[in-house]
Amino acid sequence: MRLSGYRCRVPIYALGDRMPFIHPDAYVHPDAVIIGSVTIGAGSSVWPCAVLRGDDGVIRIGERTSIQDGCVLHTTHIFPTVVGDDCVIGHMVHLEGCTIENGSLVGNGSIVMHEVIVRSGAVVGANSVLLNGTEVPSGSLAVGSPAVIKPNRARPAEIKMGSDSYVTRARTYRDGLRRLD
């Protein structure tokens, strides 16, 4: 079974022949929703009210990546949504048909659209909008609406600290979260 070893009661749905795969070492909060062609890697976490909807295409989440509260990840039949390893996807982020490479951070409230590539170690500032086809180079900061690229402004140590903190937090929740009603 594709979800073997998964311990939480989470709304996880197949859609036709599209089935999620959640690594047994990942954490998905019981109030998140996973639908269709979604893969979540080892050590990654998906937090309350996040929706990952792989109905038209594929969503892939790497290892040790956090998809935080209220995020919406969608895809199209043309453009997959791919998030690499060791990424931080902040609260209330919308990702659709884009690629977020390893070790990147997308700040709270940001929108990242079709064919956008956020290269390794880049940062998308809070509330920024990356329009179709934008590329954020490695180590750069993208801020604003629409986003302006600022080279060499990312802080890799802060991205790593954020990623590591959510790996630890996911273990705490997986082992200790219990409903009290």
Image (tube, rainbow, N blue to C red):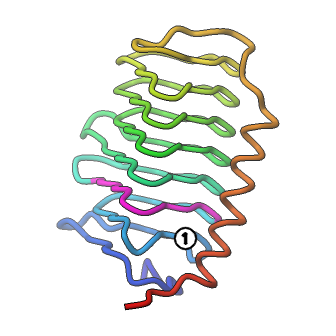
> Where is mark 1, residue-wise?
27
Considering the image in quadrants, where does the N terminus appear? bottom left
Task: Look at the picture and state if 130 lies above or below 161.
Answer: above
Q: Could you tell me residue 2's position as x and y percent? A: 43, 77
Q: Could you tell me residue 59's position as x and y percent? A: 40, 50
Task: Look at the picture and state if 157 lies above or below 138.
Answer: below
Query: What's the amino acid at mark 1?
Result: Tyr
Q: 143 or 7: nearer the eye?
A: 143
In the rendered image, the residue lying farthest to the front is: 181
**73 horizontally vs 165: left or right:** left
Q: Image point 52% across, 43% down: which residue?
A: 90
Q: Residues within 10 Å of mark 1 (few under 14, many from 20)?
A: many
**Magenta highlight range:** 43-54
Residue 132, quarter of the rendered image:
top left
In the rendered image, the residue lying farthest to the bottom is: 181
Question: How many numbered marks have been drawn onto this rendered protein structure?
Answer: 1
Q: Image point 56% across, 25% down: which residue?
A: 125
**14 horizontally vs 141: left or right:** left
Q: SS of the residue at dot 1? A: strand
Q: Image point 29% across, 61% down: which residue?
A: 36
In the rendered image, the residue lying farthest to the left is: 16
State yes or no: residue 48 in magenta.
Answer: yes
Q: Image point 61% across, 84% down: which residue?
A: 176
Considering the image in quadrants, where does the C terminus appear? bottom left
Task: Look at the picture and state if 99 lies above or below 7.
Answer: above
Q: 37 or 111: nearer the eye?
A: 111
Q: Could you tell me residue 73's position as x and y percent? A: 36, 46
State yes or no: residue 41 in magenta.
Answer: no
Q: Could you tell me residue 19's position as x and y percent? A: 32, 68
